[in-house]
Image: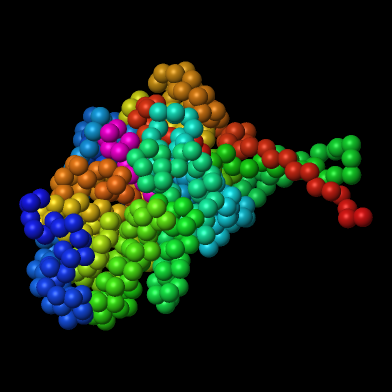
Amino acid sequence: MTNSPLAADQPDQRALALIGGEATDANLRRYLHGIPGIDAVGLEARAADLGTRSIKTSSKRWAIDTIIGLIDLTTLEGADTPGKVRSLVAKALVPDPGDPGCPRVAAVCVYGDMVGAAVTALGSAHAAGGTEGINVAAVATAFPSGRASLAVKLADVHDAVAAGADEIDMVIDRGAFLAGRFGQVYDEIVAVKEVCRRADGTLAHLKVILETGELNTYDNVRRASWLAILAGADFIKTSTGKVAPAATLPVTLSMLEVVRDWHRLTGVRIGVKPAGGIRTSKDAIKYLVTVAETVGEEWLVPHLFRFGASSLLNDVLLQRQKMTTGHYSGPDYVTID
Amino acid sequence: MNRLAIPKTYKLYIGGKFPRSESGRVYEVLSHKGDFLANAAKGSRKDARDAVVAARSALGGWAGATAYNRGQVLYRIAELLEGRRAQFIDEIMSSEGGNAAAASAQVDEAIDRWVWYAGWADKYVQVAGNANPVSGPFFNLSVPEPSGVVAIIAPQGSESLLGLVSAIAPALVAGNTVVVVANENAPLSAISLGEVLATSDVPGGVVNIMTGSPAEIAPWLASHADVNALDLVGAGDLDWVELQISAADTLKRVLPPENGADAAAPALSRILAFTELKTVWHTKAIL
């Protein structure tokens, strides 16, 4: 499908061609409501089935190292300080001080005002969008609620990009989405994407947080995923982690299906980031299986799949230590966040 | 018409719940005559791992409870044991043999031992702690605090209930949480004790009882980095020197095996074996 006329150089033109007109509420509603509905029972059964795979020994070892390399190590607390961010970065660089062979995480994810501290702490290990090292992701657009004027949201993004953020995690306006004002959501994503442009013309990676816990139905999750991708998202992310339920396997599966369909339609690969609520390596391995079975193993790379997590890393390290030493490890043998 | 008896499923007691072994395995428990008594869950290393997680998460609440409260909770167990006398006597007679008088005496002894240890809960600190004389204007206080998660291999000989109680009660008194591997050949009273604990005021996870092979489970507990102490009282038939060596890798406190009639005899030293002495300095007066 890579030769499809839809794989145009102009992503916005492609979106408009798909929508069949300008990105107005009416056109978007016609398009998004024309997407087939989701069989919720079937989706949940499929997700549960994917969670029953038994991953052992060398496969588990591979899975654990892969998970570490896909983590966005996150701290999003009101009480964050530059010191907290420095220790988070130290952990991202050397997750397990007892084992130099332990891989690094993909990125650290902080609030916009902590980007400078994270960039400084990373120093030469800052990937700055490259493949070597660690990226800095910043949540922006009045995270987590998104309840602010567009000007404030754009200023928020601009500050984070200017401070050196390589990835921007924006939230959509769930209120507008649920009220059917799809055009507003679309325009906001497009505007934010434009502000992600750096002085040299390159773009910070844009992750769009759907906050699936507030979207109520799988159909809405699917529509929001399409909407975000049409508007130019590089990544679609499940949740902020501040709303329960956060990431669940069925929701992530439904988003992966959209990404798969988009790839078939346009040849473009969009990333997926489940965030919040993934705390054990057992859970994380279920996500790896789901990704591999839905969009394929080539998605299991940092620029196409991430885990947004903080406590997950410690559990994965405990499992890793168990596999290395043959003995069960304990929380005293990993760092406290 | 003959009524079909409903045999009881003996399961593990982990985190306040009664799960089957994750391995799905069971083993036959035989009476002293060799007749089939019941199928008991054959715990695996992963059950032990789950039990340690449960014990660790229960530790804060149990160690943080006041000594008086812990004493009350332990005393309450003795009350409930008293109410279940008939069941315990029946199980002991069928699995260990002996007459009703001997079984009854064992249950009595076990209950009395609970009460004896329960009484120590708000007293052992006074006995073992101290106000140390120091050459300066300071209060210098040493107080024993619980070690943490204690893994116990229960006595494997006769007197299964008394042996189990003698092993777990002293560890609980100080505020430790416990993972105990029950008597392999006579595990029924251990699981019934779990039922007593589940209906008493003991928070879930404070006591975790596993049935199965101590030879299989003990090495995993001995090497587990999140276990703080190891009581090998019933490990006399295992390669317990090896267990001690692997426990040393993570600096566990270890009690050696004891054999004979007075194994795990009630003593203050058994309580203090799983405590750490904390010493604090505090200025004597505000000038």
Q: Position of residue B257 (x, y in %)?
A: 49, 24
Q: Is residue B210 above or below residue B62?
A: above
All told, the count of numbered labels is 0
Q: Which residue extends farthest front?
A: A200
Task: Name which quarter of the figure residue B200 lies in.
Answer: bottom left
Magenta span: helix, strand or loop, mainly?
helix
Q: Position of residue A116 (x, y in %)?
A: 53, 53
Q: Which range of residues does the magenta coloring cover?
A: A60-72
Camera-side residue: B209 or A336? Answer: A336
> Which residue corresponds to the image point at 45% horizontal and 68% vertical from the top-left?
A155
Q: Is residue A7 visible?
A: yes
Camera-side residue: A49 or B198? Answer: A49
Task: Name which quarter of the figure residue A44 lies in.
Answer: bottom left
Q: Is residue A91 left or right of residue A61?
A: right
Q: Position of residue A199 (x, y in %)?
A: 42, 56
> Which residue corresponds to the image point at 27% horizontal and 33% vertical from the top-left?
A62
Residue A66 magenta: yes
Q: Which residue extends farthest right?
A: B287
> Which residue corresponds to the image point at 81% horizontal and 39% vertical from the top-left?
B132
Q: Is residue B59 visible?
A: no
> Which residue corresponds to the image point at 42% horizontal and 70% vertical from the top-left?
A153
Q: Is residue A299 left or right of residue A175?
A: left
Residue A238 magenta: no
Colour convention: rainbow
Q: Is residue A5 above or below residue B107?
A: below
Q: Is residue A209 left or right of residue A297?
A: right
Q: Position of residue B51 (x, y in %)?
A: 39, 42
